[in-house]
Image (cartoon, grey):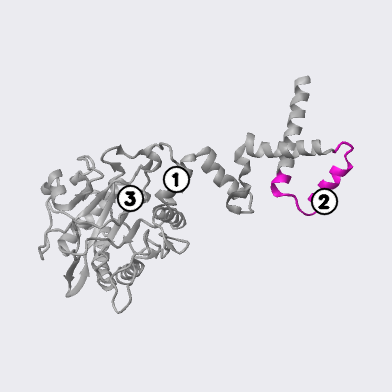
């Protein structure tokens, strides 16, 4: 019985503590504040000692015993629940997020704040830039005539690497991943003409622009608009085009967290539009100024394109477990089949597929691909011209056309 009474008292004290904490957390306002002050004045024993005891006790409860409760002033926000849970989760329960947020502010800030040795995995994210100037353009052998490869040729790991891929020095490929037969035989067809969105186009680096012509640059977002128009008007494939710019923060170029921001939006779009089966992240590449990524298709100067895959692996450290990609095989199949179809119909359109170590939000769906359209010395018109053959190849693939011959 005594134990039961103690539990009851303990429960009441806890409720009282929470109520008082809530009062002080909000700073008190209106009638509640006035009534509280009146209560203090009506209590016979209300010396400053007792008052400080209660106030300091609550503050210690907030900031000392349970520091997660002290984030009501996070970033100066007056709202309670959002900053409470967000910063509390980041700092107390999952500190890796705090490291990541600070890292995104810039390496200088990060190093200044974390002067001690921080484990390497805190600095490894999928926000690594794919915009470093490439000295090797990864150009396919210029043929001018299309070719379809045989299953026997595509079954060779060394043949695939030599003819279709550039593997970045920071990562590596395995024979299990580059199983040509499995990749080209993966069924990537989809039901067309259903009237619901099938394709989502977005731009992680939406601020990327092309060579100035008559004082105007033109951006990669305009290229996305051209692709959407081609898919919808020519092939009847309903397409969503996300024109958000994820690599600008407060009006300044900041690509550190662009993949994270874009990934959140894509996930939300996929939940809202479950009919979407294809996700395309359109970029503009960056190469040495002496490299010109141009060809002619149907008499028009056209920017060459490059499919890009992330395999969630670093050459020195191996697989990146926290960047697991359940759709990696599908991604690799998608880019290879698109590459082979381009080689059949427009052999000079594509460069070699580029493989790098992170995942670049390709894990969100099986038919996800990152496409580099031209480079900084292409015009936006050349980039837009590349969308016609790209849309055609996508239509052929989704219609079930095989990208190989027996």
Mark 1 lies on residue = 112
Q: From which residue to which does the magenta span run? A: 22-46
Please tell me whether mark 2 sits on a helix, a strand or a loop. helix
> Which dot marks residue 370?
none
In the image, what residue occupies the spot 56% across and 42% down? 88
Rounded to the nearest whole Å, what is the CA distance between mark 3 and mark 1?
A: 40 Å
* Position of the N terminus by quadrant: top right
Between the residue at mark 2 and the residue at mark 1, the CA separation in whole angstroms equals 46 Å
Q: Secondary structure at mark 1?
A: helix
Instruction: Classify 138 as above or below 18.
Output: below
- Residue carrying label 3: 366
Quarter holding residue 386? bottom left
- Queried whether the magenta region covers residue 335, the answer comes back as no
Front of the two marks 3 and 1: 1
Q: Secondary structure at mark 3?
A: loop
Left or right, residue 31 beside residue 205: right
Within-10-Å neighbours for mark 1: few <14, some 14–19, many 20+: few
Is the C-beta separation of discs 2 and 1 under 8 Å? no
Measured as percent of width and height from the top left, residue 247 is found at: 40, 59
Q: Which residue is mark 2?
A: 34
Q: Relative to the observer, which residue lies in front, 273 or 100? A: 100
Does the rendering let one see residue 124? yes
Residue 25 image offset from top left, x and y in percent: 69, 46
């Amino acid at each position: 019985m005594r134990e039961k009474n103690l539990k009851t008292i303990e429960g009441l004290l806890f409720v009282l503590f929470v109520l008082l904490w809530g009062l002080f957390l909000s700073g008190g306002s209106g009638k509640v504040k006035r009534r509280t002050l009146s209560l203090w004045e009506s209590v016979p024993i209300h010396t400053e000692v007792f008052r400080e005891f209660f106030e300091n006790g609550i503050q210690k409860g907030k900031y000392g015993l349970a520091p997660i409760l002290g984030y009501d002033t996070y970033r100066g926000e007056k709202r309670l629940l959002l900053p409470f849970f967000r910063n509390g989760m980041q700092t107390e329960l999952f500190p890796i997020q705090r490291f990541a947020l600070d890292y995104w502010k810039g390496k200088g800030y990060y190093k200044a704040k974390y002067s001690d040795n921080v484990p390497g995995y805190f600095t490894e994210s999928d926000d690594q830039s794919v915009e470093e100037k490439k000295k090797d353009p990864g150009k396919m052998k210029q043929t001018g005539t299309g070719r379809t490869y045989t299953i026997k040729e595509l079954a060779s790991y060394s043949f695939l690497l030599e003819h279709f891929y550039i593997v970045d020095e920071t990562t590596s490929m395995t024979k299990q991943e580059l199983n040509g037969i499995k990749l080209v035989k993966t069924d990537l067809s989809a039901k067309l003409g259903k009237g619901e969105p099938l394709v989502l186009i977005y731009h992680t680096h939406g601020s990327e622009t092309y060579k100035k012509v008559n004082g105007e640059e033109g951006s990669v977002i305009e290229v996305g608009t051209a692709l959407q128009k081609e898919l919808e008007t020519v092939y009847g494939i309903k397409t969503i085009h996300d024109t958000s710019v994820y690599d600008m923060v407060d009006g300044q170029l900041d690509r550190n967290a662009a993949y994270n921001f874009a990934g959140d939006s894509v996930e939300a779009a996929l939940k809202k539009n479950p009919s979407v089966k294809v996700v395309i992240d359109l970029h503009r590449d960056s190469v040495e100024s002496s490299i010109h990524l141009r060809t002619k298709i149907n008499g028009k100067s056209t920017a060459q394109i490059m499919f890009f895959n992330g395999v969630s692996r670093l050459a020195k450290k191996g697989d990146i477990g926290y960047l697991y990609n359940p759709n990696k095989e599908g991604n690799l199949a998608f880019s290879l089949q698109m590459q082979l179809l381009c080689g059949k119909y427009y052999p000079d359109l594509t460069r070699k597929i580029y493989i790098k170590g992170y995942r670049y939000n390709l894990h969100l769906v099986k038919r996800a691909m990152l496409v580099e359209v031209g480079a900084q010395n292409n015009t936006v018109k050349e980039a837009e011209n590349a969308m016609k053959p790209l849309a055609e190849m996508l239509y052929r693939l989704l219609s079930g056309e095989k990208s190989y011959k027996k």
